Amino acid sequence: MTADEIRAHIDPMRHEFAEERSLVLPALKFAQTEKGYLSTEDLRAVAEAVHLTPAYVESVASFYDRLYLEPVGRRVVSVCVTLSCMLRGSDEVMEHLCHREGLGHHGGTSEDGVITVQEAQCLGYCDAAPCIQVDADQTRGPFTVEQAGELLDELRDAPVPTRYVR
Amino acid sequence: MPQLNLVYRQREAGDHLRDLSDYRRAGGYEALRTAVTTMEPDEVTYSLVRSGLRGRGGAGFPAGRKASFLPKDAALPSYVVCNADESEPGTFKDREIMEDNPFQLLEGIAIAGYAIGAKRGYIYIRGEYEHQALVLDDALRAARQAGFLGRDIFGTGFTFDITLYRGAGAYICGEETALLESLEGKRGQPRLKPPFPAVAGLYASPTLINNVETLSAIPPIVERGADWYAGIGGAEKSPGTKIFSVSGHVMRPGNYEIVLHQTTLRELVYDMAGGFRPGHDFKACWVGGSSVPVIGAESLDTPLDYESLNGVGTFLGSAGCIVMDDSGCIVRACLRLAHFYNHESCGKCSPCREGTSWLEKILQRMVDGDGRMEDLDLLEGLFGRISGRTLCALADGAVMPVRSAIALFRDDFVRVIENGSPRPEPMMEVAVHG
Amino acid sequence: MADYAPVDLSAGDQVEFELNGVRVSVPAGTLLVDAANAHGVEVPVFCYEPRLGPPVGACRMCLVEVEGMRGLQTACSTPVQPDMVVRTNSPVAKDAQDGVLELLLANHPLDCPVCDKGGECPLQDRTFRFGPGRSRFVEPKRHFPKPLDLSPRVALDRERCIACYRCVRFSQDVAEDGCLTMQERGALSEITTLTGEPYEGRFTGNIIDICPVGALTSIPYRFVSRPWDIDNTPSVCGGCAAGCNVELTVREGHIMRVTGRPDPNWEVEEGWICDRARWSYDADRAPSRLTAPVIREGERVQQPDLDAAVDAAALVLANTGRVGVLIGPDATVEEAFAATELAHTGLGGAPVQALTIDGAGLAPLRALPTAQLGDLDHAQTLLIVGGDPANQQPAVELRARKARRRGAHVITVGPRPHALESLGESHRSQPGALRAALEGLGDVGEGSLAICWDEADLAQEPDAAAVLARIGREREAISLEMGHGANAAGLRALGIPSTGLREQIAAGEIDCLLTVHADPTAAPGAAEWGWALGRVRHIVAVATHDDQVTERATVVLPAATHRETEGVMVAMNGRAQRLRAGATPPEGAAPGWELLIALGHRLGTPPPYRTAATAFAAASAAHAALGALTHDDLGTLGRPLPQTPVAGNGHVPDPVGFSGDGLPLVTVTRIFGERASHRSQALAEARTGADITLHPDEAARHGLPAGARVRLRTAHGECELPLVIDPDQPQGAALVATGVPDAGVERLLPADRTPVRVEITPA
Ligand SMILES: Cc1cc2nc3c(=O)[nH]c(=O)nc-3n(C[C@H](O)[C@H](O)[C@H](O)COP(=O)(O)O)c2cc1C
Ligand code: SF4
Ligand code: FES
């Protein structure tokens, strides 16, 4: 994404913050909607738009789980593995999905690049344990192992998102 | 909130109040009108002090007192910040408030803003709550359009607006100073205190930070009076109602608004949350989120309020009540929590960064069958070297659940060290929502 | 490394408190760590570093018990309160210190025997004194591929890092380059730059000094020595006029390393030094270093021993008619004094000139009260006029940034873009129009004012100097001259003129030239000087490196560099400080003052001093400007010379106009684009060359594409340079990089350093 596009997104909210630095997270999140992750060029563009160094921007981005500095799949499937979900079978769900997609224990991206499966820490849907979040906006549960597998099939068939909200 | 709608308004049908018109019909925004048209800012603060409302984010600090700490004549502008980072394991009450009753939160923030003389508030919402953020986006738009935010609210000259700020996945950003750092565009790492946010918070300005649930409780308090609220429940230092998020091995996980002190843990777990599967019964529970000492069946009859829970060695915390039945393995549960804190430690202070990572390694070794008896002493030594010595309370939160588990369920640890720990069958029936 | 801030126990406003059972007092507001240190109690720290800004309380090493406060307190962030009862050595406090060390060591590789920091490592040290006897950590340690080069000069070993954040805070909050950061979080935290980029900057090496473990080490120093076979000597950098104090690490007579002082000079550099100061020491052993004397007779070149060479030099000087003495701005006070004495006695009143800026128009500015660099900390407004301190006197950059962080309003006025323009309000002046820019400022900020002004720029514009001095007087400002030449101020104190000799040579009045650390072909007026050198029959050169002068000299006497000699240099703001001989000069070389004294003996006028100290005492007795100071008076931190203000009459002289045709020439200098960096191997990758920079429109007007080689011509000389096009550069000026050895740019400039225009054509 270019610095100009990022500026166009953040300029209307500049007045809401006493310091420009506050715009770095909104800028990073917005830049990520384009490809679903942040390339070094994106980091540079953000840095330019908010007048910080690219190294600083990268350091901020790397702090947060939901900003990706490496390419990830078209859809990111986060399986909550924290205590409430664990008690309800999240490990079984996670193992099943990883096995199904041919991934290692802690997840990864499927060979076709469509699905990234990752462990998540408590997603705040413990009442729906075990829960799964697709990208950042749809969280559902409870899932059985089979239902979780079906979810991946649905995602594979779904249209490519126009923007990625991770 | 299925059980009680005393403080957190619901439409009659118990459905959500996402439309401003519904919220208005349910009495919404009358409190803000009352505050800005009939009360001095200090009166609002005083009313909060008298209500006895305590912070619902975890620490339980009296909300009115906190607001009264803000300097009256500061050179810099003041801010209200709503902590909507809700990432404490087992806690999902703020989610439901924001999703179903966003305006009550916005109204509460505006009243708090009026009380401390702020012109702007921020809601810092965890990045994973994108759905709730969209609901709030809509609500903010509607409130602005209706004149409940913006210039000259109720024609009084009170000007106030709210910015919704999305996090990006970091539990530590729920810690108030880390939240401020994140909101300032930095890595979300806690600051040294003092100075406290009330004196030097966001942009070094006086800042009032409260949890979603705390702020949402303000409109009814203003509307119905501090005395009304203070009278709910009857515990002197724990008045009012509180939402408990119940999860884990219960039949009806969910949010339950209870009257503090009048409900026991047993009632919450068995009557409200539906108890356990046939053949299983209560084993342990982290009643205030995962960062509190675990308690066992002997504590089931404890009334749910701040003091009574302290009395049985735990905390009310964020009231994210994680319940485990006798099918669970306490060591595995501890390992899972240790993993959480290790993953979420911000890494700024050494005892937490190194300690949480060491803690996880030791517990992992135990679960893998390579535990040693001396590990129990080692763990106790390690706990002593972490707790109370870190910059923020995350590390204490990592220590407490495990330290208490070893104390309470030592036999289970010994058994795991001796025999390893086979993974128990999870409870995988689809939960019944109620 | 400055682990603790200095505490003034005699200052007023003291508060009493109890420290480990003893009642002591410190100034109100002192942090507990510093207070304890001032009273001889060490509270161990890792993250605390008083120079890095407010404490962060991250490492938790400094936990102490304070009666009445819940839990333990970080002494680094707790100010002393009256009657506080503090225990730093109680069982609980000791357990906390021991505990933090145990945790820090859990993942530390403990590879001390192969670590460059071994023996001088705070972690090792504190583990010994405060730490665990044993580690109970049996898990596999954190593993990183090792080590990583952060730059060609700094290596990072991530396994050794204890995440104290000192280096990151230096980059973010002191150098403010924002390039070194912590990435990831928790146990995965690591120090890094933007992926794939080196840590480049002007001050990067300071992170090595402040790292309390062996995570950051100097690549040129890697595996060079061990702490037990080195000696450390406090000295002065001598690389520019700022006068930063440094420490020389020496083994067997060779410089192994230059670092900031562990006990900083708070008035000057505060222990921060630029990368040129840190890494250019290997210039002393560059191929161009003169290691043996040379005598040239026609085509014959001999390399006699030093004694014979001095004899030969004396013969040449005694027998070649009229002698002139030219002294370079890096010569020490002792060298310059011995040379002038020699001129007056042994050489029968030979004329002497220093290769320094003629500061006739600067008198009113020099009459303002002189600031120490440390005084900038307290300024409410900082006015920086001309120059480019980041490249020319780098210490000023850090002080200006610090002043800004402390709330000072920074105003820059000058003809060239530079790094400090972004600190506040910046006014770019048209070439030759500094006065107008200053007059256009209106109110110059608020409160106490400190003026930093560039010697070269204001000497060129005496009208601006007069106006600036008036602002200074009206505002009761303090003044910091950003001077040029490591000891130019010392030469001024000795009363050595900056003009005259070249004109005398040109007039055929000089037959023989004695040069002392002076190569006029590398200074403005290079072309005229080149021609003048051709007019003298003999040159006797006292010099450290091969240059245009030594190549023509009849006798070359190799001299010690400023790392190899005792002596005094006077920094730009009149601070006299001592150089100490860390290293020994090569076999065939000797300190310049020794050579000059020897010449005095050979010429029958033996001076009454034999050492640098007695030479300085004699100089100081003869020149009131040196304040009757002695080497002993100067100690390790030096002393400001007394100021002898010349009352000005407020007269504003006429501007000195530009001569010639074409675009006004504005000189620029780059920190690694000068002699020492070009001689240094360690700085090879950082080095920059000479070029001309134009605004794109200006380049278009001249029909020049980027990267083209262009020919530059003034009334004085010409040269060829590559063209850089940069939209951030001003229009209506040609920015030309000076100071680069052998680039010939100095040929464009007149010896009197008056402003010129330059004609630019494709080469
Ligand atoms: C590690 C850590 C995480 C926290 N997370 C949250 C959180 O997600 N939401 C919250 O409201 N408070 C959280 N807190 C508590 C806040 O620091 C703070 O006490 C609270 O926002 C104050 O609001 P209250 O007084 O209304 O409770 C956390 C504290 C710690 C130490
Ligand atoms: S206790 Fe943990 S999370 Fe809190 S500041 Fe220290 S390292 Fe960060
Ligand atoms: S020195 Fe105090 S916490 Fe590091």
Image (spheres, coloured by chain):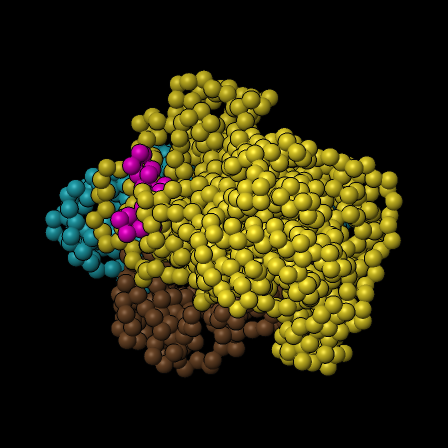
Left or right placement of residue C438 versus residue C387 in this view: right
x then y, percent, for residue B189 = 47, 49
Whether residue C315 is visible to the viewer of this picture, yes or no, is yes
In the rendered image of this protein, which colour is used for chain A? brown
Judge by depth and name the residue closer to the eye, C139 or B318. C139
Q: What residue appears at the point 36 percent right and 47 percent down from the top-left corner?
A: C251
Instruction: Report which quarter residue C741 is drawn in.
Output: bottom right
Chain C palette colour: yellow
Describe residue A1's horizontal placement relative to residue C263 as left or right.
right
List x then y, in percent, for residue C32: 47, 30
Please say if C644 is above or below C203. Answer: above
- Which residue sits at x=32%, y=68%? A107
Question: Hue of chain B?
Answer: cyan
Q: Quadrant of residue C618?
A: top right
What's drawn in magenta, residue-wise?
A: C112-131
Whole-percent x, y for residue C359 in the image: 75, 48
Q: Which of C698 and B281 is in front in this view?
A: C698
In this view, C727 is above or below C212: below
